[in-house]
Amino acid sequence: MLCGEGRVVRDRPVARRNSTTFRYRLWSDAFPDLPLDGWDETAATRELARLYLDSYCPVSVGSLTGAT
């Protein structure tokens, strides 16, 4: 619930990298220059899509919509 609200983020595993037990950090500690309240949902979705496309282009429409 706290991750979904943007209060904490999952960090590295506690033990080995394939461990299923993780550490968690406060959002503000992990990303101090990225306030969550600075985005509305539509603008955040557009920015996320832009960053994804910049990193992984070319992609299919299904990559952005979840369709295959």
Image (cartoon, rainbow, N blue to C red):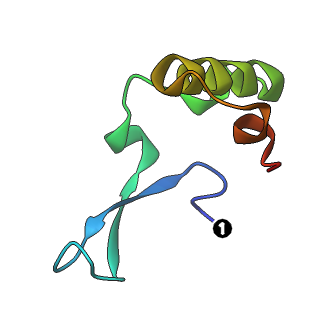
Residue 17: which quarter of the image? bottom left
Give the amino acid type for the residue marked by disc 1 in the picture.
Met
- Measuring 51% from the left and 16% from the top, which residue is drawn there? 54
**Side (left or right) of 6 relative to 12:** right
Asked if 55 appears above or below 2 in the picture, the reply is above
Asked if 19 appears above or below 28 in the picture, the reply is below
Secondary structure under the numbered disc 1 in the rendered image: loop
Pick the residue in front: 20 or 68.
68
Residue 40 on image: x %, y %: 77, 23
* Residue 68 makes an appearance in the image: yes
- Measuring 58% from the left and 22% from the top, which residue is drawn there? 58
Residue 15: which quarter of the image? bottom left
Pick the residue in front: 6 or 50.
50
Q: Read off the residue under disc 1.
A: 1
Asked if 46 appears above or below 26 in the picture, the reply is above
Pick the residue in front: 14 or 64.
64
**Side (left or right) of 35 relative to 33:** right
* Residue 38 makes an appearance in the image: no
- Measuring 34% from the left and 74% from the top, which residue is drawn there? 22
